[in-house]
Image (cartoon, rainbow, N blue to C red):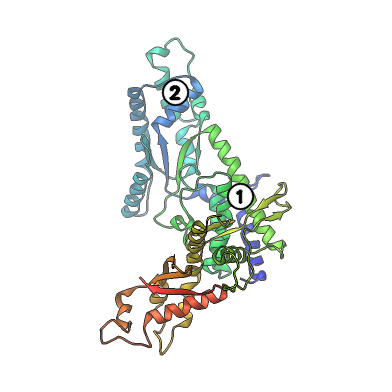
Amino acid sequence: MSRPGLKNALDFVVARATQRKESAKKKKDPQARSDLEKEYGQIYVINKNHQAAIIYKEFGIRLTLTERTELFNLIDGFYKGKEALVKFDTPEERTLALANAQKAKTKAGDFAYLVTNFEQAKTLKYKSKNSTDASQIQANYINNLERRSNQKPISAAQISKASQVGHGDRGVSSSQFALDRAVQEASEKFNLSDAEVKQLKTIASISRKKHNIKVNMNHSQFLTSGGKFKKEFNVILSSQYFRLNTEDAKRERAAFEETLQEYTDIINNPTSTTVRDAVTEVVLEAFAGKPSKNKKVTGKRRKVISEKSNASKPVSRSEEKVKRYAVFRGVETDGIHTPKKEKASSRTSFVQLQGLLNAKLPQTVAKNMGAPRLENRTGTFASSTRVTEVQKTPQGFASIGYTYQKDPYGVFERTSGTRFASADRDPRDLIDLSIREIAQQMAIGRFYTRRV
């Protein structure tokens, strides 16, 4: 991706992710949070053991297993009554949403219900004008326990304050949604390649990992290529202890702002090593190994990418070392250090080589197709090609194993024994040619290929 193209895409991502909704309020809410909260047909998860732990921590009241069951029988009846009122356009949509609610119950003690949106989940939890709600049910049950007959009553407001409705614990946080949506929309608007989109998402992923943010699902599970929610997806909310929810929000904000800073650094710092170049240089260093008189390696090599980035608006942070990394077809590299042991070094470098080859193989195969070779008519063959493994031969060279969709293309192998067997249209020759073309760009020396 050219630097003007990269700058335009990243400018859009930063602006879109930080967009504020139009409002008469002096302090406008983030557009992404507003869109996430308003999405219709959400799932609210509440765990009876977690809720009992909150009650014990905040009020010193330990509920027995029997009491937890009794209390949640009441809460369950309340939420199911409200769930029945949630309307969908078709019975099929309701059936799918109910099935998703069942899937959302991933822990022992989970209860999950359909709500219209985030605001209704908050209202059903507690609102002072409510005649009854989940917090009032809990307060009434606790206050009526025989052992608390002489104790000061606990109010519904106190119960409600101890827990909050959040997105990030079980579902998609508003900051993740803001960034993932912005990148998906940028990919359409600026015609970014899959590798370029993956690079942008990788920057966000490393920030989330650094700040210990749990990611429950990736963008492909809930967003279309244009950045819209998938029809079969339901936003998941959950009841969280208020202190933990506050801590999560701080870490999410830090990761969000750090990601935006990384995007800004790429725009403003033309001397910064690009993600693709950084990965290629590191893998070349690991793959090539120590120089020797019988080995010739060309190309820039480095053992680890470690760059310093000075803070500038919109994020304020001190100078720190930043490792850039990328994910190619699911293989991640995070400032790869060459291990001391040769066996471990080879294994690491071969895995990274596999990822780099797979990042370019389908499009390279498609480019090399055409008479007298196989012709690219539907794109099925090219997209099915992939490197499955890279092993080390006794002589120390790479042996690259690859595969493709053998049904129906395997009949064209010259040794297939079918009437379609052809030396010109043999898929193995086409894939071998493409792998060698990619390897030449990476300045990798001698290696072997084989169909597995």
In the picture, measured across the screen, residue 444 lies left or right of residue 61, that is: right
Tell me what residue is drawn at x 41 percent, y 81 percent. Answer: 429
The spot of residue 68 in percent (x, y) is 36, 26
Q: Which mark is residue 256?
A: 1
Q: Say few, some or many: other residues with alpha carbon within 10 Å of mark 1 (under 14 / 14 to 19 / 20 or more).
A: many
Q: How packed is label 2: few (under 14 Cα within 10 Å), some, or many (20 or more)?
A: some
Q: Position of residue 124 (x, y in %)?
A: 45, 35
Q: Is residue 129 above or below residue 292?
A: above
Q: Residue at x 52, y 59 (%)?
A: 342
- Snapshot quadrant of residue 430: bottom left
Q: Which mark is residue 139?
A: 2
From what the image shows, is residue 84 above or below residue 387? Answer: above
Query: Residue at the left extreme?
Result: 418
What's the residue at 57%, 73% (across, down)?
Answer: 294
What amino acid is at disc 1?
A: Phe
Q: Secondary structure at mark 2?
A: helix
Can residue 389 be seen by looking at this rendering? yes
Q: Quadrant of the C terminus?
A: bottom left
Q: Position of residue 73 (x, y in %)?
A: 33, 29
Q: Is the N terminus in the top left, top right, bottom left or bottom right quadrant?
A: bottom right
Residue located farthest toward the front when viewing the structure as drawn: 293
Query: What residue appears at the point 46 percent right and 23 percent down from the top-left corner?
Result: 56
At label 2, which amino acid type do we have?
Ala
Whole-number angstrom distance, CA of label 1 to CA of label 2: 37 Å
